[in-house]
Image (cartoon, grey):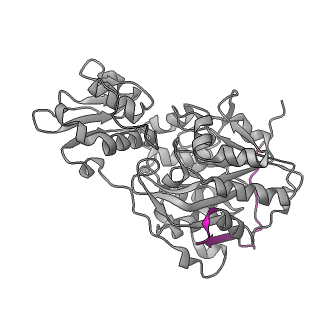
């Protein structure tokens, strides 16, 4: 099988990379308009893989996933540009069904309409890649489909992120990692003694050495603020940001979210290692009055426990998937945990492989806490879905109908 090597797009030193921005016209027209100043002639007779962000099995209006109409716009644009083949591929969170995420997220309907192939990128064996001059990840497993297409398009939904500040085009490349490889990035030693940054930020910058998108289109129609990428609140910001330069789209995406791009550690590391600029003035941005589309996002909370009365959360080295699942569980079932309060009048729950010094009677959630299996209730999963946590604690199924998100 011919596995193509992804090559970075090199911009002339004297040329400002173009970033297109649009807003206030919905997910389809936003993408169409944001791409108007971008030269897409490079796509003629080339195969294109659209990589959305499917964070959960959820409907588009919840802000977890890339909106299907944003993908529809890209399909039409690349068809007009003369692409030889277009496909949509995803390697979702561990424990999520790719086909169910495509179905509930409205993407299957779009794919059927345009006759586009949907690819579960975890089906076939991965491609192992060495990362030169790595900080923390020296070798990684990437889904094979990434190397079978000429053009890789990152199509994230705009979201804040509890560990990385934001998750946009560059962070979306982590979704190209094969199965549990995504989890491994979270389970590395929390902080490398050789670097002051969180290991996850260093790991993302390592991945960017070997894998960057050829085009980034950020869908900011309905994003997620607060405890993103999966436990926050939907926000209708109604914008799109697009660029052939991977940093350009993310820099302007941050600004449209009311976030200083230089404060996002993984973006700073990627910029330093690739000589990319975090200054919006380094890019040719169209239209010039793009700031009218800014909709500030609420940042992630510093302590999940403060949002829930009488809940104590022990968390150490937990991945975003587990944290988001815990948040969804507490948001839905916190009022039903009163029979399980400890002698201090609080419900205690723990996640993360580094958690310790917990109160007797604490509920331990997720495979990373398996070393506490003999202490009290341990609920396996990577992570277990909220309803599974509820059933393990209470011994009964939820009274409500199936929720919109799992």
Quadrant where the N terminus lies? top right
Q: Is residue 329 left or right of residue 173?
A: left
Tell me where residue 312 appears, x and y as whole percent.
22, 41
Q: Does the magenta stretch include residue 222?
A: no
Tell me where residue 143 appears, x and y as whole percent.
67, 35
Residue 307 or residue 165, whichever sits in front: 307
Number of numbered discs on residues: 0
Q: Is residue 35 left or right of residue 206?
A: right
Tell me where residue 130 appears, x and y as whole percent.
66, 36
Tell me where residue 21 appears, x and y as whole percent.
64, 71
For the view shown, which residue lies furthest in the left direction?
Answer: 343
Q: Give the range drawn in magenta.
A: 6-27
Could you tell me if residue 116 is visible in this image? yes
Q: Is residue 17 magenta?
A: yes
Q: Residue at x 46, y 63 (%)?
A: 263
Could you tell me if residue 210 is visible in this image? no
């Amino acid at each position: 099988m011919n596995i193509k090597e992804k090559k970075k797009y090199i911009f002339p030193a004297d040329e400002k990379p173009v970033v297109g921005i649009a807003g206030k016209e919905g997910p389809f027209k936003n993408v169409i308009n944001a791409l108007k100043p971008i030269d897409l002639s490079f796509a003629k007779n080339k195969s294109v893989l659209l990589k959305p962000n499917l964070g959960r099995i959820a409907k588009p209006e919840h802000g977890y996933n890339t909106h299907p109409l944003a993908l529809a716009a890209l399909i039409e644009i690349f068809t007009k540009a003369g692409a030889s083949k277009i496909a949509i591929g995803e390697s979702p969170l561990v424990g999520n069904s790719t086909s169910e995420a495509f179905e509930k997220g409205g993407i299957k309907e779009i794919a059927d309409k345009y006759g586009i192939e949907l690819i579960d990128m975890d089906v076939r064996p991965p491609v192992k890649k060495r990362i030169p001059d790595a900080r923390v990840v020296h070798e990684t497993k990437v889904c094979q489909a990434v190397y079978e297409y000429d053009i890789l398009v990152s199509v994230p939904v705009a979201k804040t992120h509890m560990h990385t500040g934001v998750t946009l085009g560059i962070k979306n490349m982590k979704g190209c990692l094969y199965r549990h490889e995504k989890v491994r990035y979270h389970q590395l030693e929390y902080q490398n003694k050789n670097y002051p940054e969180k290991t996850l930020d260093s790991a993302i910058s390592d991945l960017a050495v070997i894998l960057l998108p050829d085009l980034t289109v950020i869908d900011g129609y309905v994003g997620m603020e607060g405890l993103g990428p999966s436990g926050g609140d939907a926000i209708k910001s109604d914008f799109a940001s697009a660029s052939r330069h991977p940093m350009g789209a993310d820099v302007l995406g941050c600004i449209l979210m009311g976030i200083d791009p230089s404060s996002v550690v993984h973006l700073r590391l990627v910029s330093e290692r690739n000589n990319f600029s975090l200054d919006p003035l380094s890019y040719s941005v169209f239209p010039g009055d793009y700031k009218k589309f800014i909709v500030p996002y609420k940042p992630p909370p510093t302590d999940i426990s403060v949002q829930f009365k009488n809940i104590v959360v022990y968390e150490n080295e937990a991945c975003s998937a587990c944290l988001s699942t815990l948040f969804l569980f507490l948001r839905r079932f916190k009022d039903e945990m009163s029979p399980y309060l400890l002698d201090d009048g609080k419900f205690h729950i723990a996640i993360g492989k580094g958690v310790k010094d917990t109160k007797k009677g604490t509920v331990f959630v997720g495979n990373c806490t398996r070393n506490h299996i003999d202490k009290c209730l341990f609920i396996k999963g990577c992570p277990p879905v909220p309803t599974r946590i509820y059933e393990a604690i209470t011994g009964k199924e939820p009274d409500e109908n199936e929720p919109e998100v799992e």
